[in-house]
Amino acid sequence: MPSRLMMLSFPGRSLGLAAVLLAASGCSSALPPKELVDARSSYSRANQGPASTLAPAQLDNARQALSRAEGAFNEDPESQQTRDLAYVAERKAREAEAAAAIEQAQRDKAAAENNFKELSQQQLASAKDALQTGQQQIERERQARAQAESARLQAESARTEAEKARKEAEDARREAERVANAALASLKEVAAVKEEKRGVVITLSGAVLFASGKSELLPIAKEKLNQIATTLKDQGSPPLRIEGHTDSTGSADANRKLSLARADSVKAHLISVGLPADKIATVGHGPDRPVADNKSPEGRANNRRVEIIVNPTSAQ
């Protein structure tokens, strides 16, 4: 049985199954998750603070990250993708604050050092009142050093915080890759899965799904589809395109009608176990898209199939 997963993507190239989970749900009235609330708060604090002038580039990165999180929330408020993007946005807002703190600390340190130099020059110029000026200078130097040391400590603290945020973001990325690999392994237990330009393609043999010439699902087909549906629901119920295919035996028109009927049967079952109907499209290609030579029994068997494309692109 597939494990509960946070995000679906694939090694070697971001499969965009983060985008799979961003499918629009239009639930603008839903309460935002804690991660998004935190991201909004952190960005507001950064935007109203020194980061707006001292770290505008980092603040803009945080703004864009928050915008992506808001977009994901508007499309699907309860998705893991919304929480993940909100978490990244909150981290970027903190990075902007840290960058501003570093910049401010560096400016303060430079100002303190310049002040220290000016005070030294004043000491030389005030030799007539050496004792009084010397005492004043000593105090001023002490204060300047204290300011410089304070600025140095602030800069060091800011650098530490920024490094911590970077490591946390890296840990989150690695965890996303781990669960993506687990998702792929779960799907491969029940069907052939591969990544193509048109999306993530889950291929099920027609012989496993249907009796010859029929469009009613076999019991074993429902079991496999139940497992696939569980994994897809764990990923926020991404958009799907179900494509039916046949071999070249018989009339092409009849085969196209049969392939569409079979795709519709798969859709109906997925809807019955909880996947949203408005995110599932079907198409029947009949014998038009063979993957093997129809001259052999093995080739015809390979051509009789149903493909579920997860997060389909425009490529049909």
Image: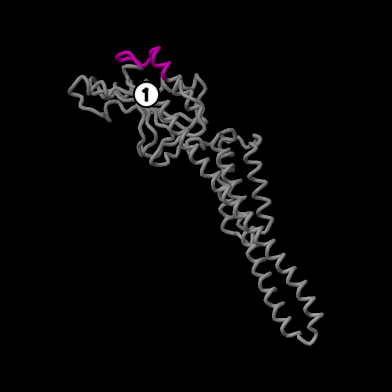
Q: Nearer the viewer, residue 261 or 124?
A: 124
Q: Write down the quadrant of residue 157 in the picture.
A: bottom right
Position of residue 177 measured from the top left corner of the image (x, y, whole percent): 46, 37
Instruction: Using the image, determine if residue 210 lies above or below residue 59.
Output: above
Asked if residue 250 can be seen in this view, the reply is yes
Is 183 one of the magenta-colored residues? no
Q: Nearer the viewer, residue 247 or 20?
A: 20
Name of the residue lying farthest toward the front: 131
Name of the residue lying farthest toward the left: 295
Q: Write down the quadrant of residue 222 in the picture.
A: top left
Residue at image coords 20%, 24%: 294
Q: Nearer the viewer, residue 218 or 220?
A: 220
Position of residue 178 measured from the top left corner of the image (x, y, whole percent): 46, 34
Numbered disc 1: secondary structure: loop
Q: Badge 1 local density, few (<14 within 10 Å), some, or many (20+)?
A: some
Instruction: Using the image, determine if residue 67 lies above or below residue 119.
Output: above
Q: Quadrant of the C terminus?
A: top left
Name of the residue lying farthest toward the bottom: 128
Query: Is 168 on the left-hand or right-hand side of 261?
Result: right
Residue at image coords 52%, 41%: 171
Asked if residue 66 can be seen in this view, the reply is no
Q: Please state the extent of the stretch shown in magenta in the rendering.
A: 209-224
Name of the residue lying farthest toward the right: 132
Position of residue 50 measured from the top left corner of the image (x, y, whole percent): 67, 59
The amino acid type of the residue labelled 1 equals: Ala
Q: How is the image coloured?
A: one colour
Is 214 one of the magenta-colored residues? yes
Residue at image coords 57%, 55%: 58
Position of residue 308 measured from the top left corner of the image (x, y, whole percent): 39, 28
Residue at image coords 44%, 23%: 228
Q: Which residue is mark 1?
A: 191
